Amino acid sequence: MPNTYTKIASVSVSSALGAASMDFTSIPATYTDLLVKVSGRELTGVSLLFTMQINGVATNQATRELRGSGAAATSGTNTIATIDQNGSGTTASVFGSADIYISNYASTTTYKSYSIDSASENNGASAYMRLSAGLWSSNSAINQLTFYASSGNIAQYSTATLYGIVKS
Amino acid sequence: MAAGSTYTTIATNTLASNTVSYTFSSIPSTYTDLVLVVSNLTTTVAGQSIYMEFNGDNSAVYSETWINGDGTSATSVRRTADTKGFLGGYGAGTSTTNPAMAIGHIMNYANTTTNKTALARYSLGNVETNTLVNLWRSNAAINAIRVYTGGTMAIGSTFTLYGIAAA
């Protein structure tokens, strides 16, 4: 029976000084879809956000988002994949969570759609959720994904794991 | 999630021509849950949702609750006597430069003693995002899923059905 759901790579921030990014490079084109699971926290930033660049660039993206704060649901847009994660001001040792599903990523003839479900949770004091639809307007195959804290470094113990899903 | 045999492709198809619907038939009852992935979906008519119909049943026994975001406002709606389930799409259209993707999770699909619940997540990058829960008020095991829109699904649209086994 084939392995439908395979880990391609995993990144973990080991330094107490954090890391500028979490990066997946040379992603093979042999899968159907990609799934990234992120557990992250900003080292110094307080915006509660990570961003995701595709193939090393921050351009050609468009998103529609649903956001929930526990008090209200709102909708907005972004020009780069934006992911709720924990900021440095949240309770120590608490990290955000995200699933990023990228379909048809290896195509060289179509634009790429992605879906993001993410959340930051502050130990019961507050929590935010963000559901995003994303479009990368490029026919290039996706071979690199890079995650950044919106300011400063990504904190120690943050992780990201990239899975490949193959349909046959 | 463990790699390997807990997550298995049951069937997949990429449309070779424009098609009104695509049906997964003879779905085996040997899995615990189903995951339906639709990618690179474009339609020939704008403003279409994407639907799923179980076992050929188009009677008014489906209900859904949505939450939708179009970049300006968040809205929610509920329908209680629909004739089909939804994978998403709140009324905006796709195009070749804005393909949609949808993921449906159909839980406990093979049991013959309970109604079936399906979660769906739809993404159309520069138009809308939505998520919803469906209920099919039938105790029948799901052995067929028809996917369709109000228009025609274009060449290149891809449909894949995975089975997830709990053991």
Image (spheres, coloured by chain):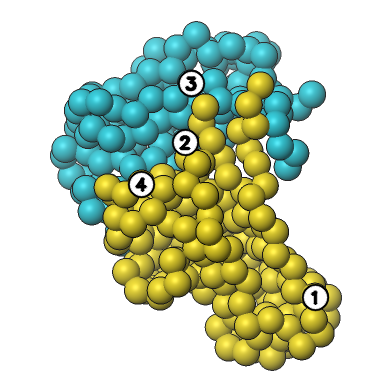
Chain colours: A yellow, B cyan
The residue that label 4 is drawn on is A107
**Disc 1 packing (10 Å; few <14; some 14–19; many ≥20):** few
Name the quarter where the N terminus of chain A is drawn: top right
The residue that label 1 is drawn on is A14
Q: Are marks 2 and 3 on the same chain?
A: yes
Say whether residue B117 is visible: no
Q: Is residue A8 left or right of residue B98?
A: right
Q: Are marks 1 and 4 on the same chain?
A: yes
Q: Amino acid at mark 2?
A: Val
Residue B16 versus residue A59 in the image, above or below: above
- Which one is earlier in the sequence, the residue at label 1 or at label 4? 1
x and y percent of residue A50 in the render? 57, 75
The residue that label 2 is drawn on is B37
Residue drawn at point x = 45 percent, y = 72 percent: A56
Residue A158 versus residue A149 in the image, above or below: above
Secondary structure beneath disc 2? Answer: strand
Of the two numbered discs 1 and 3 in the rendering, the one whose residue sits closer to the viewer: 1
Q: Chain of mark 3?
A: B
Check whether the beta carbons of the residues at disc 2 and disc 3 lie within 8 A of each other: no
x and y percent of residue A37 in the render? 65, 57
